[in-house]
């Protein structure tokens, strides 16, 4: 599975999702209404995705998956960085991308929500 392709393809299906490269071509950033919900980059020659997560769910995922860590260069409580692993599936990644998107839009004023 191509972690970046799966995450980016699913992000592109979400309402008002935009893709930018504000930190250079090697850092793909997906936003909704100007707020980041997904980052794709390479760390130590390995593709990773970074996304927002509920703190309790994030803690559980970090303890249950060796390839899920606290968010790289992000708030360690609210963000996760994920690399490919044995139990990391397409459906799992798509679910996490959607959860991140929903968490971000929940912080927007109702008039700006998709």
Image (tube, rainbow, N blue to C red):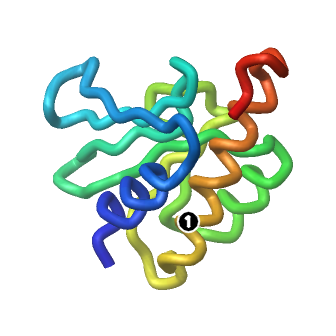
46 left or right, relative to 62: left
**From this viewpoint, which residue is outermost toward the bottom?**
86
Image quadrant containing the C terminus? top right
| Coordinates of residue 93 in the picture (x, y in percent) | 53, 66
The residue drawn where x is 70% and y is 51% is 99
Image quadrant containing the N terminus? bottom left
| Coordinates of residue 100 in the picture (x, y in percent) | 65, 44
**Number of on-image labels:** 1
Q: Of 15 and 103, which appears nearest the observer?
A: 15
Identify the residue position indicated by label 1 in the image.
Answer: 94
74 left or right, relative to 27: right
Asked which quadrant contains residue 8, the reply is: bottom left
Q: Secondary structure at mark 1?
A: helix
Q: Of 102 and 54, which appears nearest the observer?
A: 102
Is 28 placed above or below 81 here? above
| Coordinates of residue 22 in the picture (x, y in percent) | 27, 18
The residue drawn where x is 41% and y is 33% is 18
Q: Of 92 and 61, which appears nearest the observer?
A: 92
The residue drawn where x is 42% and y is 50% is 12
Is 106 placed above or below 81 here? above
Q: Residues within 10 Å of mark 1 (few under 14, many from 20)?
A: some
Is 44 placed above or below 75 here? below
């Amino acid at each position: 599975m191509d972690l970046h392709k799966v995450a980016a393809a699913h992000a592109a299906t979400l309402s008002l999702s935009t893709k930018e490269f504000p930190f250079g071509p090697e850092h793909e950033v997906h936003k909704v209404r100007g707020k980041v919900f997904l980052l794709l980059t390479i760390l130590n020659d390995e593709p990773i995705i970074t996304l927002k997560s509920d703190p309790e769910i994030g803690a559980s995922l970090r303890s249950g998956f060796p390839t899920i860590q606290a968010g790289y260069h992000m708030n360690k409580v609210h963000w996760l960085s994920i690399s490919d692993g044995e139990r990391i599936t397409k459906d799992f990644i798509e679910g996490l991308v959607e959860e991140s998107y929903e968490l971000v839009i929940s912080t927007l004023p109702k008039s700006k929500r998709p």
